[in-house]
């Protein structure tokens, strides 16, 4: 239906959307959005150490395991659609054919907003590359001369979700989202990522810390809305408003 609102999350690896935007995904699905997740890679080479330590492991076995984890996480978050581009990781690279495929997806989804990684990540250049590609493909999707006759993209906001070590990434949140009502869904999605169990508690603690920031910024000191869990985002483009 044309009046259904949509969103698109572009994830460098198969687990990134869970840690960094799982709450936003589940919340917007609950609000009636159709959220599509695009995993550019499975994170099979660089983000699957636990799997590689098992005997007899192969690249295809790792990919298959990570896909199952991502699909289970997506189900826990009520994701509308999840797509896997299988571009490889460490490094993540995309040619013109791959970019055209992402442009096609952006135009098909027509997202009210998009999400991807921080602009800078010295620990994992795949993350920053995914956002560079997301911005480039957003631009192409807006071009009337790209596949003339197709519906062009409007101007959706691109939110950069929180990196693992935000103080090292030049990432500064300007938006906090209360995800308390869907925290159980995010935690279930987190626990679907069996290959990275070492991150479960880290992202639980982070959600609690951002909940504190939400409370302090929503009402000053301790007087704000009692959000227990939240996610932080940095917006790329100006937001247009009628009043402050």
Image (cartoon, rainbow, N blue to C red):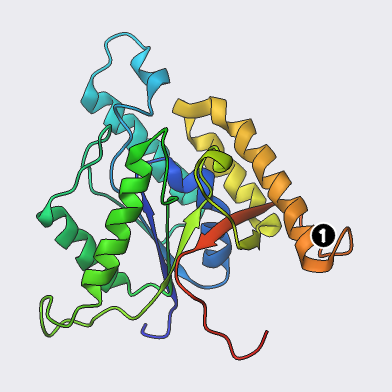
Residue depicted at 10% across the width and 76% down the height: 147
Specify whether 77 is left or right of 152: right
Let me know if residue 244 appears in the view.
yes
In the foreground, 167 or 102: 167
Residue at image point 64% right, 56% down: 182
The x and y percentages for residue 223 are: 89, 64
Image coordinates of residue 164 in percent, x first then y, are 53, 38
Q: Tag 1: Cα neighbours inside 10 Å, few (<14), some, or many (≥20)?
A: some
Quadrant assignment for the N terminus: bottom left
Q: In which image quadrant can residue 187 be found?
A: top right
Q: Which residue is mark 1?
A: 226
Residue 156 found in image quarter: bottom left
Which residue, as the protein is rendered here, is positioned at the far bottom?
Answer: 242
Q: Residue at x 60, y 55 (%)?
A: 232
> Where is 101 relative to 67, above or below?
below
Q: Quadrant of residue 205?
A: top right
Q: Quadrant of the C terminus?
A: bottom right
Q: Is residue 163 left or right of residue 64?
A: right
183 sits to left or right of 128: right
Q: Is residue 206 left or right of residue 127?
A: right
């Amino acid at each position: 239906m044309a009046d259904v609102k949509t969103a698109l999350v572009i994830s460098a690896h198969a687990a990134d959307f869970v840690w960094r935007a799982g709450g936003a995904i589940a919340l917007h699905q609950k609000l009636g959005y159709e959220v599509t997740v695009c995993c550019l890679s499975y994170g099979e080479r660089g983000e699957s150490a636990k799997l590689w330590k098992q005997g007899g492991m192969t690249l295809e076995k790792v990919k298959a395991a990570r896909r199952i984890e991502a699909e289970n996480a997506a189900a826990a978050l009520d994701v509308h659609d999840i797509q896997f581009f299988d571009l490889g990781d460490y490094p993540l690279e995309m040619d013109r054919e791959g970019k055209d495929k992402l442009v096609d997806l952006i135009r098909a989804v027509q997202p009210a907003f998009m999400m991807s990684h921080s602009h800078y990540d010295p620990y994992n250049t795949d993350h920053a590359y995914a956002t560079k590609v997301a911005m480039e493909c957003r631009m192409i999707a807006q071009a009337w001369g790209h596949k003339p006759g197709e519906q062009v993209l409007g101007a959706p906001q691109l939110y950069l979700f929180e990196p693992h070590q935000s103080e090292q990434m030049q990432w500064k949140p300007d938006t906090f989202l209360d995800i308390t009502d869907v925290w159980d869904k995010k935690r279930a999605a987190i626990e679907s990522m069996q290959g990275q169990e070492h991150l479960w508690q880290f992202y639980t603690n982070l959600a609690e810390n951002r909940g504190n920031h939400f409370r302090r910024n929503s009402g000053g000191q301790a007087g704000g809305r009692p959000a227990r869990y939240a996610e932080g985002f940095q917006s790329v483009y100006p937001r247009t408003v009628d009043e402050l």
